[in-house]
Amino acid sequence: MSMDKGAGDNAQDGDLNKALNDLEKAQEHQARARAEEAAADREIGEAIEEVKAAEEHDRDRVEVHVTHVNDVEHASFKERRTATLGEVWDRSYKELKIVRKEKDIFQTAGDPPKSLMTHLGLTLEEAHKQKVITDYRFGIVSETGGA
Amino acid sequence: MAKANVAPTMDPVAGAAAFDEDIPRVLKVLGAESLEALGWRRPNKLSLLVPLKGTHNGVTDEYLLRLGFQAYRTWPPSAQFVNPQSLTYSYPQDQQFVPRLASPECRTHIAYERPGHAKIQLICCSATLEFYEVLHSVEAHHVWHETDSFLTTIMAIKRAFGDFYEGRFAPHG
């Protein structure tokens, strides 16, 4: 004698299968989410390392501001503290996109500005320590004649 | 373009226009929003007043530089240290308002003599109009270019204050 399932039993089996399917899908989602989370953690770790490296790099650099007085132009750029004033002066022309003139003078941007022409061999760090400069703002001017 | 041994020609209309044109460029490069923010003042279309100071033997003195743009920008601005009350310069009564600057690039004279002409105050620097008016000798590379601006003049004078300021001219009498 066979026992046929009643309509109520069939409905219960259907609900159970659906619930098992849903559980399986949910577990798959969870596994994917955990994998993504692990990947995100790795990326965050890498990014933090990059930030640390950039900070380390920036610690050795300062923001330099240069004004070309005659051409009324300005440029800002990062430069190594170990760069000499002469190197900063050279790079300034590239950043300003201005051609150097023979009688140009490199000077502080202080008030009053002071010529740096006898200090071009000092590094930014040395110049700051020796109070030749008080900040990293500079000016380029063409020599004038008079007297 | 300015030339050695050629007397400057005045063109106040062009001068005022060039001055108008250069003000925003200069403000931008100095990172200032207005002339007043720099402590400067424009009393009329052709003049700019710039306070300057110099320190000699521990004493700081204040001065007022008046730039005039009547021949600008073909020629540099006129530059005179003036009495801060009258905003003019009369020799000899105003000579104490002139700093002693003794730079190879910029030297002041309270009464520069030129045969056949009245004595004038001369800021002897190739970035001032008076330098050309007195037909001063000048090296080719020092001659004013039309690409220069009044900032060149101010900076040349300021630089002289930095290393070559020798105090105030004594009052007359």
Image (cartoon, coloured by chain):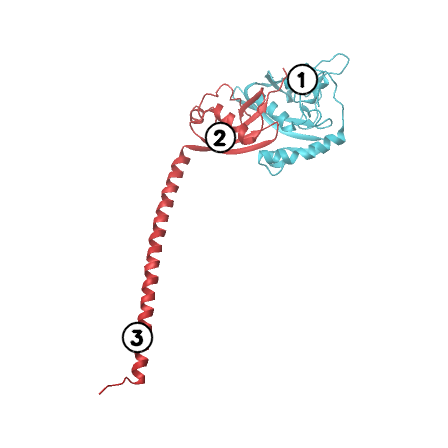
Q: Which residue is mark 2?
A: A136
Task: Measuring from the top left, give residue A37's x and y in whole percent.
Answer: 35, 55
Tell me which amino acid carries mark 2. Tyr
Disc 1 to disc 3, C-alpha distance:
108 Å
Q: Residues within 10 Å of mark 1 (few under 14, many from 20)?
A: many
Tell me which amino acid carries mark 3. Leu
Quarter of the image for residue B106 reads top right
Q: Secondary structure at mark 3?
A: helix
Residue most extreme to the right: B116
Q: Residues within 10 Å of mark 3 (few under 14, many from 20)?
A: few
Residue at horizontal 66 percent and vertical 33 percent from the top: B22
Residue most extreme to the front: A1
Residue at horizontal 51 percent and vertical 28 percent from the top: A91
Q: Which residue is mark 1?
A: B110
Quadrant the C terminus of chain A occupies: top right
Quadrant the N terminus of chain A occupies: bottom left
Disc 2 to disc 1, C-alpha distance:
37 Å
Task: Measuring from the top left, give residue A84's x and y in whole percent.
Answer: 45, 24
Quarter of the image for residue B114 reads top right
Q: The chain coloured cyan carries which letter? A: B
Q: Is residue B14 above or below residue A52?
A: above
Q: Which residue is mark 3?
A: A16
